[in-house]
Amino acid sequence: MSNVGFRVIQYNNRVDQEVIEGFKGIATPNIGDVMGRMYAMDHSIKSVNKPGIHIVGSALTVRTHPSDNLMVHKAMDMAQPGDIIVVDACGDMGNAILGELMCHYAKTKGIVGYIVDGPIRDLYSIAEMNFPVFAKGGTPRGPYKEGPGEINTVISCGNVAINPGDVIVADDDGIVVIPKGDAEDVLRKAQDIQTREKMVIESIYNGNWDRTWVDETLKRKGCEVIEEYSYRKK
């Protein structure tokens, strides 16, 4: 019998590691662009680390009752190297979901980072140790450890649905979620965009950046370009 709301599901169907590794070094905006500029978490969930953070990993999903982190602790014990623990705490800002000690433990486990739709504590210590954590903010108020919650079920984090095993990429710009069934296709397209952007940058400094599309778009949209003299004369 399924105990909905208080259950732990074992999950090992991760995206091929070579595909996950391929997303390293690709900025989240480029990845988001090839997914219709969707699948990006709300901007309120942001890095608490020093600038320059960029992480890629497989989502280990946790749904927890706001103010409680029992299931986050269980997820830490279950996690495999390369996992990112993604926590749906309902966006509630009442109690911290994790702190410095949990980050130290995560480092020993090979966990890539945490993403929390809620607050954390020990922000300064976490920033100093530079363990990747993305959250909505901080609070000194600690969590309870009673449950309920779920591990490896579909969750919502930052207004994006996340399945266990989805690929997570997070950097200074924010967080994107790549559905696991689309990861290879998204990777290929994101790599293409990255290559094209490098070519555009070269053309900018060579003085060859084609800007004709701007006026072409204005014309197609029906925008009238009026000479100043003619406009005043009327």
Image (cartoon, grey):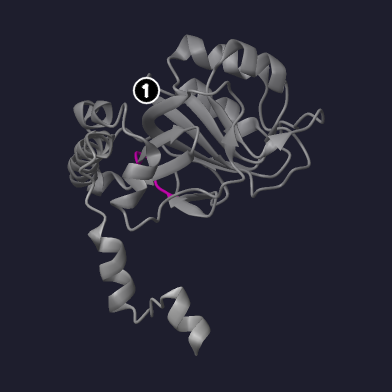
The reply, left or right, for residue 194 in relation to residue 93 is left
Residue 165 magenta: yes
Q: Is residue 136 magenta?
A: no
Is residue 152 visible in the rendered image? The answer is no
Q: Position of residue 20 (x, y in %)?
A: 27, 30
Image coordinates for residue 82, horizontal then vertical, percent? 37, 22
Q: Residue at x 24, y 48 (%)?
A: 181
The residue range painted magenta reads 162-166
Q: Is residue 225 left or right of residue 48?
A: left
Question: Does 184 sit above or below residue 234?
Answer: above
The answer to which of 16 and 202 lies nearer the viewer is: 202
Q: Which residue is mark 1?
A: 82
Q: Nearer the viewer, residue 45 or 107?
A: 45
Q: What amino acid type is highlighted by mark number 1?
A: Gly
Q: Secondary structure at mark 1?
A: loop
Q: Is residue 132 left or right of residue 163?
A: right
